[in-house]
Amino acid sequence: MGASEYGEISPSSMRLIRRKAYSLIGKHGFREDDREDLVHDLILYVLQALPHYDPSRASLDTYIARIVESKVATIVKAKRAKKRYAPKGVVSFDDDEPENTDDRTDTCRSLAETYSSDDWKRAIGTFVRSVQDQADLDSDVRNALADLSARLRPIADLLSEMDVTAAAKHLGVPRTTFDYWRRLLRRELAKRGLKEMP
């Protein structure tokens, strides 16, 4: 059950340590190669904690089980922190150029080739249409809205003034119901050639 003068770990505690280390494999980024290192780390931690054992508070196996649980939680937390706080900086899409540049299928394309300036401006909300394009779009929207059914027209009017949540509150319906109506409106406008709608 116990240890001789707290200098060695009992077989049942060793089984617990191995089981806890093995349970981490395949989770939180630990691989099979990490298994023995985890076992050794847990054993070392337990041996360092044994001098602090107080038999009046718990049995030695219970104490070791709590120590192992605590250390496993600390190891997992540290592993997650490494992922969360990975070094930040500017990453270039062109850094991973293949050695063999003769083969054009393996060549990495730069960000500029895959994402146009207009696409970028649309994504961050700073895209500005030309005066003619905006006038054409306004005309198309007016024509499409005029052709909407009496059921969808109020939905379009509300969405031009407020967001989905506020519009749902205004009508006194659940947001999910209003969102369904908004999807119907989008489909109708898409049929008329208008796919961009807030």
Image (cartoon, grey):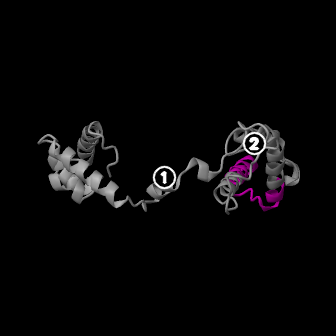
Q: Amino acid at mark 1?
A: Asp
- Rendered location of residue 20, percent (x, y): 72, 42
Between 67 and 93, the one lying in front of the other is 93
Q: Residue at horizontal 68%, vertical 50%?
A: 69
Q: Residue furthest left?
A: 150
Which quadrant holds the N terminus?
top right
- Is 50 left or right of 129, judged from the image as shown? right
Residue 64 is a magenta residue = yes
Q: Residue at horizontal 11%, vertical 42%?
A: 150
- Using the numbered discs, state the Cα–Cα distance from disc 2 to disc 1 in whole angstroms: 48 Å
Which residue matches tag 2? 21
As drawn, the label of residue 119 is 1
- Rendered location of residue 135, percent (x, y): 28, 56
Residue 173 is a magenta residue = no
Q: Residues within 10 Å of mark 2 (few under 14, many from 20)?
A: many
Q: Amino acid at mark 2?
A: Ala
To which quarter of the image does residue 151 belong? Answer: top left
Q: Which residues are magenta?
A: 47-73
Q: SS at mark 2?
A: helix
- Is 146 left or right of 111, judged from the image as shown? left
- Mark 2 or 1, which is nearer the eye? 1
Q: SS at mark 1?
A: helix
- Rendered location of residue 52, percent (x, y): 78, 62
Q: Residue at horizontal 38%, vertical 58%?
A: 129
